[in-house]
Amino acid sequence: MIPAVMRPLPALALLLALAGPCAAQEGAVPAPAIGEPAVAEAPRALEPFVARYRALYHGKPAGSATLQVVRQATPRWRVDLGIEGEKGMAGVLGLNVQQSTVFENGDAGFRPLSQSTVRKGLFLGRRSTGVYDWTKGSAQWRGDLKKRHQQPVSLQPGDMSGLLINLAIVRDARPGAVLRYRFVEGGRVRDHVYQAATVPETVAVGELRYEVLRVARTNGGNDDTVVWVAAGVPTPVRILQREDGEDAVDLQLIEYEGTP
């Protein structure tokens, strides 16, 4: 068995609100330096990993998050996101979230099989679970949802959960590309359209410079999502959700490690 290799990413001066680089570890691999492509030419192959993030809420430090992809019995995988609110009122406001999607990875791309969400807080607690039945061509959720969101939803090829869309952006992002996905989760269906920047952003970290590609949702209305990706990194460098033009939940990558 090949041991996992920890790859810390320094705190990016223009992307990370908290200053100071992560301490380097033995075998560490830095983010791609300027002059390297922001994304690979060929679609990135899915690989298991664990990534750790700083979590900000309305621009203020609010906790931490973990995003992981786990390989199960072929062709099944699982992606999990856990956000832990640790400071201020973050937990009360529902920042504490656990999400998971079991999916298949094949010729048709990422195909979800089941999805779950758990929200925790001092005065808030909600759970929901859903099953994507591709034989019947429908998906349905149960739990703490409005009645209309518990009705069956017709599936189309390419439908994905929110976590899978984040992975698909890492896989598909190319300078200037328009990415189209269909979000199906929690009894809701939405078309998501993302526009990748035409050129990478140069980010200074001390005396070093790095390149990342910004991918922004263009049809989110008052709810925007922006994802930053970098070459050689299997997980988003940053995931920012904005509400009414202001930053809401902001996940900023600290480090990640590949797993067997």
Image (cartoon, grey):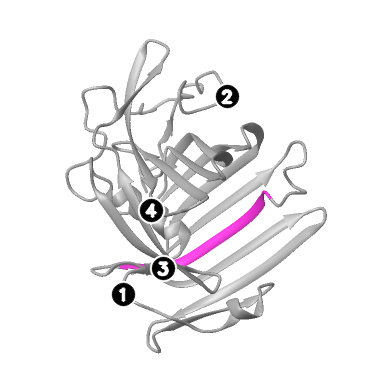
Pick the residue in front: 217 or 135: 217
**Residue 104 lies in the magenta-colored region:** yes
137 horizontally vs 107: left or right: right
Q: Amino acid at mark 3?
A: Phe
Calculate the distance from the C-alpha at mark 2 to the C-alpha at mark 3.
Answer: 34 Å
Please report contact status of discs 4 and 1: CB closer than 8 Å, yes or no. no
Q: Which callout, 4 or 1, points at the residue further toward the start of the chain? A: 1
Q: Main secondary structure of the magenta part?
A: strand
Q: Which callout, 1 or 3, points at the residue further toward the start of the chain? A: 3
Q: Is residue 244 above or below residue 27?
A: below
Q: Amino acid at mark 2?
A: Leu
The residue that label 2 is drawn on is: 18
Please report contact status of discs 1 and 2: CB closer than 8 Å, yes or no. no
Crowding near pointer 3: few (<14 within 10 Å), some, many (20+)? many
* Residue 245 position in % (x across, y down): 54, 41
Pick the residue in front: 251 or 9: 251
Pick the residue in front: 96 or 155: 155
What residue range appears in magenta?
A: 95-105
The residue that label 3 is drawn on is: 103
Taking the view exactly as shown, the residue that stands out farthest to the right is 123
Does dot 4 land on a helix, a strand or a loop?
A: helix
